[in-house]
Each structure stands twice: as structure tokens, then as C-alpha cells.
Amino acid sequence: MFDNLSDKLDKAFHILKGHGKITEVNVAETLKEVRRALLDADVNFKIAKDFTTRVKEKAIGQDVLTTLQPGQLLVKLVKDELTELMGGDVAGINLSGNPTVILMSGLQGSGKTTFSGKLANYLLTKKNKKPLLVACDIYRPAAIQQLYVVGDSIGVEVYSEPENKNPVEIAQNAIKHAKANGFNVVIVDTAGRLAVDAAMMDEIARVHKAIQPQETLFVVDAMTGQDAVNTAKAFNDILNFDGVILTKLDGDTRGGAALSIKTVVNKPIKFVGTGEKMDAIDVFYPIRMAERILGMGDVVSLVERAQEQFDEEEARKIQKKIAKNEFGFDDFLSQIQQVKKMGNMKDLVGMIPGASKAMKDVEIEDDAFKHIEAIIHSMTPIERSKPALIDVKRKARIAKGSGTKIEQVNQLMKQFEQMSKMMKMMQGPGGKNLMKMMGG
Ligand code: GDP
């Protein structure tokens, strides 16, 4: 996420590291590089200029040069400004209605339908809500079909009226249907166009007026940079929306949209989309994003994700097995499944402080565990529960069966052994100290 920007900012701060004594000149030089980094990330010129001016003023105000660690203080000032630029505090979603009506707006292809599904899934699984998805695109039957596919995949009902050509009526009827059937959130997916046009704006404005949503969300593709900001402005002028959803942040986005939108429309980014799957949705925390951009990682999110996936029952079972020396490959496999549920590897690595930079040139596959899983699946049940049985002959068979090389099987066996040993150590008499050392 925003790798290029992170890289350039890191280089900007490097200027300060090369000097024994930090002077006004090299602070100015650093800030100039920071500005250039922002411009390269497709941040609007005025926003970038104001940004560095503010940092400079604060640096002078706080007497950066006389502090013990001027470099660190400057990084902190930049972090604070980046946080402000992206909205400051985290913005929640208003779920006060009965039912709560959420209207989705945005151009075609921005990720509206996908996000409607993700939001429904989030509200269903994390907020205990009963959402209803509404298909209001009267122009493209495929769009209605797409919403049904999405709804099916997450077990959420979809409301549509394929014969009705009046989106205002469809939305109103959907709300009636929700009230009559106990749905407490109604998510209305609307028709988009390839570019802003008067007919589309008029249509969504009429739907907006008729259903008076608690939340009007504007969905925009982060990859489109400055265009995203212009589109946001056009939609905001008509709808005065409540929040922005930035999608496709998992792609090669430069960051311009995330960094400029708040200043231009004065509306917060509420969620981000980080993939095509239904669980690739994150609440947007400006400070966490600023820290990630500055290579400080995002340990808070990482721990939260681990906690979400943590299954106490499963952990206790594993603990018992380790104590009895019964930890096998089936357990290993189930641990992998848990890690996988936390998100894609690239994303997780980005949350570890410093790791993004250190692993910049390492190609991380989307499915980093593919080979390991294939190897384990090629073992017989008895081999999985008693790994000691796996001799050279069996290894050759497993390699063949999983389409891997024998070295890969060896490597996995070794990793497994080390991991079992370490887990055993953690449980042994010295384990408590070890846990303490690790901050547990
Ligand atoms: P709509 O026309 O606004 O409803 O857009 P869609 O929901 O159909 O999305 C357009 C394309 O973008 C689809 O291929 C989606 O799978 C993809 N997409 C949506 N959100 C994301 C995201 O967060 N990351 C990635 N990589 N792709 C996404």
C-alpha cells in the first residue's frame, strides 16, 4: 500500500541522518523532498504545499533544531500532519435509523456493488445486524445479477424489481419490505455511469431525497488519483454525502486520493476496500494509515485481526496436544487456516514495523501457503499425526503427489520440527519467562 510514497518519504528523512548537526538548511531540504514525494503520489499541488508549510511552522514553533532528536521530532510532525490530512479522528457509521438506510453512490466500476456486499457482511458478522441489499440499477440487468451473486455468497437477502424502471419506487418499496420483514439495515446499490453525467446525478438526487438515508456513502476507486477527487467533488455538490469509501487500496495506488479527498470535500473516509473478497474491508483509521505510510507498521490492526481470529477452544486443544507430544500436521494446517483468515500476506507484512521496507524486493505470493498446504494434503492421515514416520521414500512420494520438490518437503519438515520444539519450550518450566520476555 502506497509503497512508492513510503519509499520517497523514507529517503527524504535520510537527508537528516547523514549530517552530524541538523541545520535549518537540511530541514528545509527534507521538507522539499517530502513535498516532492506527495506530488509524486498525485496529491494536488496546493495541498502538498500547504502541508509542508504547516510542518515547517510547527517545526519552528517547537524549536526542532534544539531538541535532542530533531529527526525523530520532524517525522512525528509529518505523521501528525498526514493523520490530519486524512481526516484526523476515525469516523464511525451512523446506524441509528430503524431501519438504517444507507445509500451507495459512485461511478460504474468504482466497486460500489462489491462494497455494498462487504458492508452488509461487516454489519452482519461484526455488528449483529440484519441487512437487506437493494438493487436499484435499472439499466444493467447484469448489475442486478451481480448483487444476487454477492448476496448469495454472504447469506444476505437481495431485493429487486426487474420489471420496474423507477429507482425511487424500488428503493421505497425495499424499505417497506425491510420494515415488514425485520431487516434493520437497508443498503441501496445504485446505477453508476462511466463518467459524471447530469442524468445520473439527477436520478441519484431523486432517490436520495425520497428515502432520506442516514448514511450516504460515496465509493471511489483509489487508483484513479486526482480524478477520484474531482468525482468526489461533483457527487458531494449534489448529495452532500456523509463519507467516502476508498476501494482497491490493495492495488498499486499512489495515495493521492486518500491524502487529498478530505481537504477537498471535507468529508471523512469511513472504510477502505482492500481486495475483491467479501472480507476485504477495513474501517479507516487516519493515524494507522499515516504510520503505515511512514514505515512504522500498524501493530494495533495486526493484533486486532489476530484477536478476531483467535479461537480459545482451538488454542486449548493445541496446547494439550503439544504437552502430550501429539502436535501434528493436521494441527499445523489448522493454524495456517487461522493465519490466512487474518488477511493476505502482503497486507499483514505491511503492518509489521519496518517489514515493508525490509521485504520490499521480496515477491510475496497472494497465496503464500499454497505449497505448504499441497504438501500436507499429500500426506496420509497417519503421516500427519506421526511426522516421525516420514522417511526418504515417503518424502519422495509426498513431493510427487503435491507437485513440489523434495527439498521443499524437507524444508517444511524442518520448519515443523523447529516450531514444535519452540512451542514445547514455551510450555516448559522456562516458558513463563520466555513469554514474559516476549511481552506476554
Ligand atoms: P460497481 O460498478 O461500482 O458496482 O463496481 P464493482 O463492484 O462491480 O467492482 C468493479 C471491479 O472492481 C470488480 O472486478 C471488483 O471485483 C473490483 N473491486 C472492487 N473493490 C475492490 C477492491 O477493494 N480491491 C480490488 N483489487 N478490486 C476490487
Image (cartoon, rainbow, N blue to C red):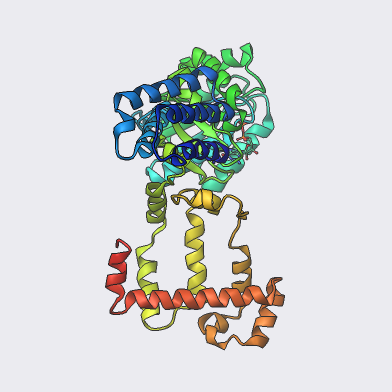
Q: Quadrant of residue 70?
A: top left
Q: Is residue 207 above or below residue 140?
A: above
User: In the rendered view of the protein, which quadrant contains the C terminus?
Assistant: bottom left
Q: Residue at x 42, y 57 (%)?
A: 309
- Residue 134 horizontal/vertical position (percent): 53, 31
- Residue 432 horizontal/vertical position (percent): 27, 72
- Residue 226 horizontal/vertical position (percent): 58, 23
User: In the rendered view of the protein, which quadrant contains the N terminus?
Assistant: top right
Q: Is residue 159 above or below residue 367?
A: above
Which of 223 and 281 lies nearest the eye of the viewer?
223
Q: Quadrant of residue 3?
A: top right
Q: How many numbered marks are there?
A: 0
Which of 244 and 381 lies nearest the eye of the viewer?
244
Q: Residue at x 54, y 19 (%)?
A: 45
Examine the rendering and report whether any part of residue 198 can be seen.
yes
Horizontally, residue 376 falls left or right of residue 295, namely right
Examine the rendering and report whether any part of residue 184 can be seen.
no
Of the four image quadrants, the one with ligand 1 is: top right
Q: Residue at x 55, y 27 (%)?
A: 36
- Residue 54 horizontal/vertical position (percent): 39, 22
Q: Is residue 116 above or below residue 190?
A: below
Q: Residue at x 46, y 35 (%)?
A: 271
Horizontally, residue 194 falls left or right of residue 171, namely right
Q: Is residue 17 above or below residue 318?
A: above
